[in-house]
Image (spheres, coloured by chain):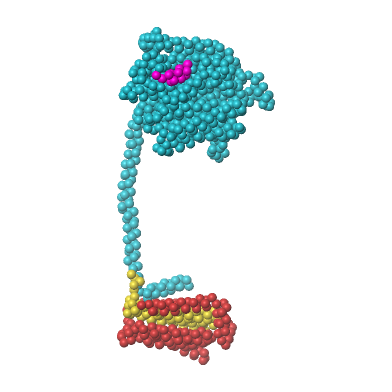
């Protein structure tokens, strides 16, 4: 069976599921962030794959680039926030940061 | 001077006293005595202007009919209510009468009211009254006239009750106002009939419509009714029988007020109104007017004979003379009726002011003597004032001679004309009672006026107070002199025996009736020949005027030559002779009773005791009204009160009880149902809150799980 | 055949290393697993003829984001303590997370496998995409490009501000 669109999509789907699992189950906020990166990468893979199998139009590539830029920005801000949380709580466990409840 | 200018000056004459009123009423304290001088000078200017206007009007616009301004006051859709001012010969002469008497009263009051604490307010009210009266005079429509009619009513009320500390004054002012309301109701109803029919308040519009044969509800009876209703206003205002009872009581007001309002001007407004509506009065209405006048003249004269209060005698005399004027207009002696209004205004104002002078002097004398319980107005306390107050005596004498109808006085000219008119009327229509009443009243007038003169001024002083009176100062005597001079004949006619030859009679011509011939006395309808001539001169087709007899006459207000005028001319000589004999008889009797004591008045009174009592008690009018109208009204009011107490209050209480019941029910409903619902809602919400709080862990990851699950569910349904 | 082999190799690298990221007990292992995931992704991009994106992936993710994450791990963890571990988690939460992600995987796979994707038949062979991407960014996508640039700038300034706040 020739490698087609579906193969890439399956990889992307697995990656996405792993990312979701990471976000949901992990306690440490930096690990949550890593799960997020996995999800973003799965989305990027879809963009590139569809771009390739739709006759190589450039839009998918440009969207991917923007996602990468946003990911960089997001990580920068998220890490800054995590550092702040650490300074206040002396840990970074998301399930104990439940001030939202009150 | 154009007629525009004349109207402009007339409106200034109207508004100046109003300005005086507003100016004085708001600055009473500050102005103090200056208010009197301000008021008097305003009236002085007014007098000058009105003399100017009247001269211009009578000399140059005498035949122009009514000069008028009309302007729309209200526009109600297609209808518009037009008001305006108008000036005809009648109004021009009335302007002089009102302004001159008002001016003299203003001057007189400077002295008479000097010590009154509400001196400025008195002048404010006088200004208000003058304004209102002038408004009636220069009205050219019924609406204006009605408005000012009520305004004179209120100013009269204020002035009668000026000394409101006295119960009698307060009651008298109420009585005057309420009695007037009765008449005004009729007046208003009459105006409404006319407005409903013609859609206009203007005299000339209404008269021309009637002249064209449009009459209210197409019925001559309704036209008569409208005339009589309008005349009811005059009955009230001019104190005619049966509404004359207020005028004698109105003497509770200050004497200058009595002179101005209740002798010369306001009470003459009724006569003026009757003169205004004269053209539209039908035969029946005229007869009604004439009888009312005759009855009033007779009754009032009989009452005046036995009264002892100085001002009350004059008040009944006024009622009687007003009856004379009304009677004159009713019988068609229009010019003489109005003439009598003017001449009467002078001498009656003079008599009242003289009485004021006497009362003032008596007051001062009482003050000096330390006497406070005597009645300064009772003629039984006077006597001999001729020597202490000569100026007052002579002016009073002149006026008395004039009112008694002695030749060479103005009163003779006008009274003679009226008597001739009643005789002519009796001759043509058969109603001789009117003429009889006129002559009888003339005799009685001469009698009681000389009785008053002799009792008050002749003989020996009856009390030490009267003996120590002094003549008043110039502020009081000058107005008296001015007014008494005006009682001479030559101001009105050079022939002292024929008023008809004077300028006055030439200027005030009887307006032709506009009522159709079938509703009018035959002798008032103008001759056919005159009609054709008049029509021809105005360039109207003769045929047209022949088919519509009175169509062309109302506009010109020309002197109507008819059968009545001829009869009146012929009746002059007999009337003059009879009236001379009768007046002489009255004066002779008066002197023999009171001056020379040939007969004993008390003995005669005993002899005809029932008549004496009837007269002394004013024909029991007040008692009759008390027993009928007032008792009826109060009883009705009591019945209403009972009705109110048991039925209305019962209903109200029932409603209240019911409301209370409903209130209880609503309270219960509120407590259990509404509150229950509210609590239920709250409980349900709290329950769901408890349930949903479980989901609100505050953990981001739990939220994410839920987000993903629901996103998946959504996705599943979409796909 | 070679192409297929290379694809499967990279696919396995990506999936296995992603599982390493998610399941490893130690944070540093997760971070290093993530490195392999990013490399694997870059390889897949190359196979999809997205050379520029592949290079960008390595430069930005490996050179930038991953370094940041490692710094973050080291700054917020007591190196010597137990906290360097990912930390234990409740069994219930673990189960829920597992079920959720399995459901997600099933739905996604089901969708991807059952949809007839409209694929173009002709394949355009190009040596490099860099030229087209550069052209596109400075013509049609100029505005998003600038917006992204400004966003990045703002994000970095904001991050610096937040991190330095004391």
The residue at the point 50 percent across, 24 percent down is B271
Where residue A6 sits in the image (x, y, percent)? 50, 82
Instruction: Examine the rendering and report whether any part of residue B715 can be seen.
Output: yes
Where residue B284 sits in the image (x, y, percent)? 53, 20
- Please name the color used to draw chain C: red
Mainly helix, strand or loop, the magenta region? helix
Q: Quadrant of the N terminus of chain B?
A: top right
Image quadrant of residue B334? top right
Tell how many labels. 0
The residue at the point 61 percent across, 18 percent down is B562
- Please name the color used to draw chain A: yellow
Image quadrant of residue C37? bottom left
The residue at the point 62 percent across, 25 percent down is B553
**Magenta-colored span:** B388-401
Residue B10 counted in the magenta span: no
Where residue B201 sits in the image (x, y, percent)? 54, 32
The residue at the point 53 percent across, 11 percent down is B577
Outermost residue toward the bottom?
C2
Rendered view: B538 above or below C152: above
Q: Nearer the viewer, residue C77 or C30?
A: C77
Q: Nearer the viewer, residue B220 or B95?
A: B95
Instruction: Examine the rendering and report whether any part of residue B145 can be seen.
Output: no
Q: Nearer the viewer, residue C35 or B550?
A: B550
Rendered view: A88 above or below B249: below
- Please name the color used to draw chain B: cyan
Where residue B564 sits in the image (x, y, percent)? 58, 17
Q: Nearer the viewer, residue B3 or B295?
A: B3
Residue B400 counted in the magenta span: yes
């Amino acid at each position: 069976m020739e490698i087609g669109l579906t193969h890439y999509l399956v990889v992307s789907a697995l990656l996405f599921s792993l990312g979701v699992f990471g976000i949901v189950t992990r306690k440490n906020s930096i690990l949550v962030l890593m799960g997020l990166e996995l999800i973003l990468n799965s989305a990027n893979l879809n963009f590139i794959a569809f771009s390739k199998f739709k006759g190589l139009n450039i839009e998918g590539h440009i969207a991917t680039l923007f996602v990468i830029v946003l990911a960089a920005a997001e990580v920068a801000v998220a890490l800054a926030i995590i550092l702040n949380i650490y300074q206040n709580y002396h840990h970074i466990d998301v399930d104990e940061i439940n001030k939202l409840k009150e | 001077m154009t007629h525009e200018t004349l109207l402009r000056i007339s409106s200034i004459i109207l508004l100046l006293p109003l300005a005086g009123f507003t100016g004085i009423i708001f600055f009473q304290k500050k102005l103090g005595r200056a208010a009197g001088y301000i008021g008097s000078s305003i009236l002085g200017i007014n007098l000058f202007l009105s003399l100017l206007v009247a001269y211009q009007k009578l000399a140059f616009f005498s035949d122009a009919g009514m000069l008028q301004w009309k302007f729309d006051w209200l526009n109600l859709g297609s209808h518009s209510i037009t008001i305006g001012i108008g000036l005809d010969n009648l109004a021009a002469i009335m302007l002089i009468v009102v302004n001159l008497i008002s001016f003299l009263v203003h001057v007189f009051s400077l002295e008479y009211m000097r010590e009154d604490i509400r001196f400025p307010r008195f002048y404010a009210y006088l200004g208000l009254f003058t304004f209102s009266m002038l408004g009636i005079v220069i009205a050219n429509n019924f609406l204006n006239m009605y408005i000012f009619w009520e305004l004179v009513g209120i100013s009269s009320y204020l002035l009668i009750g000026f000394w409101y500390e006295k119960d009698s004054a307060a009651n008298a002012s109420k009585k005057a106002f309420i009695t007037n309301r009765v008449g005004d109701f009729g007046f208003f109803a009459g105006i409404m009939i006319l407005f409903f029919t013609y859609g206009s308040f203007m005299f000339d519009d209404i008269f021309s419509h009637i002249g064209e044969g449009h009459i209210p509800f197409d019925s001559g009876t309704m036209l008569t009714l409208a005339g009589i209703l309008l005349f009811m206003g005059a009955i009230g205002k001019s104190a005619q029988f049966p509404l004359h009872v207020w005028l004698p009581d109105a003497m509770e007001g200050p004497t200058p007020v009595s002179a101005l309002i209740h002798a010369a001007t306001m009470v003459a407004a009724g006569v003026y109104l009757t003169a205004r509506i004269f053209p539209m009065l039908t035969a029946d209405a005229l007869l009604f007017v004439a009888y009312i006048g005759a009855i009033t003249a007779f009754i009032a004269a009989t009452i005046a004979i036995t009264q002892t209060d100085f001002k009350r005698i004059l008040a009944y005399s006024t009622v009687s003379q007003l009856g004379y004027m009304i009677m004159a207009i009713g019988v068609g002696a229009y010019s003489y009726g109005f003439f009598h209004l003017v001449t009467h205004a002078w001498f009656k104002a003079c008599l009242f002011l003289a009485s004021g002078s006497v009362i003032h002097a008596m007051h001062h004398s009482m003050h000096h003597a330390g006497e406070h319980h005597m009645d300064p107005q009772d003629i039984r306390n006077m006597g001999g004032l001729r020597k202490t107050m000569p100026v007052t005596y002579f002016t009073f004498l002149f006026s008395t001679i004039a009112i008694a109808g002695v030749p060479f006085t103005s009163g003779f000219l006008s009274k003679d004309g009226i008597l001739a008119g009643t005789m002519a009327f009796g001759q043509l229509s058969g109603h001789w009672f009117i003429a009889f009443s006129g002559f009888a009243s003339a005799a009685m007038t001469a009698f009681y006026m000389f009785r008053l003169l002799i009792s008050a001024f002749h003989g020996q002083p009856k009390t030490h107070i009267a003996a120590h009176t002094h003549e008043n100062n110039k502020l009081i005597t000058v107005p008296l002199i001015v007014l008494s001079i005006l009682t001479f004949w030559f101001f009105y006619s050079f022939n002292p025996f024929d008023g008809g030859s004077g300028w006055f009679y030439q200027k005030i011509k009887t307006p032709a009736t506009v009522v159709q011939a079938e509703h009018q006395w035959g002798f008032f309808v103008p001759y056919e020949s005159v009609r054709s001539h008049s029509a021809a001169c105005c360039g109207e087709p003769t045929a047209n005027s022949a088919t519509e007899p009175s169509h062309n006459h109302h506009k010109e207000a020309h002197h109507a030559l008819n059968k009545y005028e001829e009869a009146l001319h012929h009746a002059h000589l007999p009337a003059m002779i009879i009236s001379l004999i009768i007046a002489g008889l009255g004066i002779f009797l008066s002197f023999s009773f009171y001056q020379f004591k040939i007969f004993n008045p008390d003995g005669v009174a005993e002899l005809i005791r029932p008549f004496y009592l009837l007269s002394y008690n004013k024909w029991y009018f007040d008692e009759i009204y008390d027993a009928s109208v007032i008792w009826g009204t109060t009883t009705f009011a009591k019945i209403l009160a009972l009705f109110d107490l048991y039925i209305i209050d019962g209903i109200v209480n029932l409603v209240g009880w019911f409301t209370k019941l409903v209130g209880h029910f609503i309270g219960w409903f509120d407590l259990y149902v509404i509150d229950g619902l509210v609590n239920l809602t709250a409980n349900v919400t709290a329950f769901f809150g408890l349930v949903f709080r479980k989901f609100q862990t505050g953990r981001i990851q739990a939220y994410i799980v839920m987000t993903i699950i629901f996103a998946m569910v959504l996705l599943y349904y979409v796909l | 055949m070679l192409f297929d082999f290379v694809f499967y190799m990279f696919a396995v690298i990506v999936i296995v290393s992603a599982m390493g990221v998610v399941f490893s007990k130690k944070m540093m292992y997760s971070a290093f697993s993530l490195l392999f995931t990013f490399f694997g992704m870059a390889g897949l991009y190359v196979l999809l003829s997205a050379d520029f994106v592949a290079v960008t992936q390595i430069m930005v993710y490996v050179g930038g984001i991953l370094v940041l994450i490692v710094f973050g791990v080291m700054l917020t963890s007591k190196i010597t303590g137990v906290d360097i571990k990912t930390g234990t988690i409740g069994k219930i939460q673990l189960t829920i997370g597992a079920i959720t992600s399995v459901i997600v995987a099933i739905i996604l796979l089901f969708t991807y496998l059952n949809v007839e994707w409209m694929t173009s038949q002709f394949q355009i062979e190009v040596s490099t995409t860099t030229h087209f991407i550069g052209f596109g960014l400075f013509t049609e996508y100029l505005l998003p490009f600038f917006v992204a640039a400004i966003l990045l700038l703002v994000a970095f300034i904001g991050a610096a501000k937040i991190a330095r706040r004391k």
